[in-house]
Image: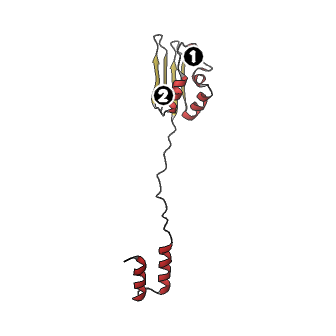
């Protein structure tokens, strides 16, 4: 037996008044919209673009910037400048493929992207953490 028939039987048996039955029947005709289940908030961790450079002469660069900032800088062609600008490290004979690094970042790569150690003792490490 459906709900409407049960309500009418309840009126007939004196269990509820016609007014109460009217409210129940209207409620049955009203579409039921449940509130969406609350979602756990996404934890957005700030991913960092990390660059560590140590030259055989002892010059050292340790850069850690938000990944989104690094993406913008690389899109404007300034990727190499993030590391080597205003330092003596511009003389290092290490040719990094910044387009490849940018592609890896766009693909969502994490961890070590570049890990170089030359015979001269120059070290370059680039990672996403």
Neighbours of disc 2 within 10 Å: few (<14), some (14-19), many (20+): some
Q: Earlier in the sequence, mark 1 or mark 2?
A: 1
Q: Secondary structure at mark 1?
A: helix
The disc at residue 127 is 2
Protein image colouring:
secondary structure
Which residue is located at x 63 percent, y 20 percent? 86
**Which sits in the foreground, 10 or 92?**
10
User: What separation in Å lies between label 1 and label 2 (alpha carbons)?
Assistant: 19 Å
Choose mark 1 or mark 2, whichever is in front: 2
- Identity of the residue furthest to the top in this view: 120
Say which element carries label 2.
Answer: strand
Image x and y of residue 61, in percent: 54, 22
Residue 29 sits above or below residue 82 on the image: below
Residue 5 locus on image (x, y percent): 41, 80
Considering depth in this image, is 51 or 6 the residue closer to the camera?
Answer: 6
Which labelled disc corresponds to residue 18? Answer: none
Q: Which residue is mark 1?
A: 89
């Amino acid at each position: 037996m459906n709900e409407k028939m049960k309500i009418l039987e309840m009126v007939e048996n004196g269990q509820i008044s016609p007014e109460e039955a009217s409210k129940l029947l209207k409620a049955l005709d009203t579409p039921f919209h449940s509130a969406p289940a609350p979602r756990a908030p996404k934890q957005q961790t700030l991913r960092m673009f990390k660059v560590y450079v140590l030259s055989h002469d002892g010059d050292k660069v340790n850069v850690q910037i938000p990944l989104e900032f690094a993406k913008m800088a690389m899109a404007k062609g300034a990727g190499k400048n993030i590391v080597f600008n205003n330092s003596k490290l511009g003389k290092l004979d290490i040719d990094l493929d910044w387009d490849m690094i940018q592609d890896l970042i766009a693909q969502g790569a994490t961890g070590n992207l570049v890990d170089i150690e030359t015979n001269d003792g120059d070290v370059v490490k680039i990672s996403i953490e």
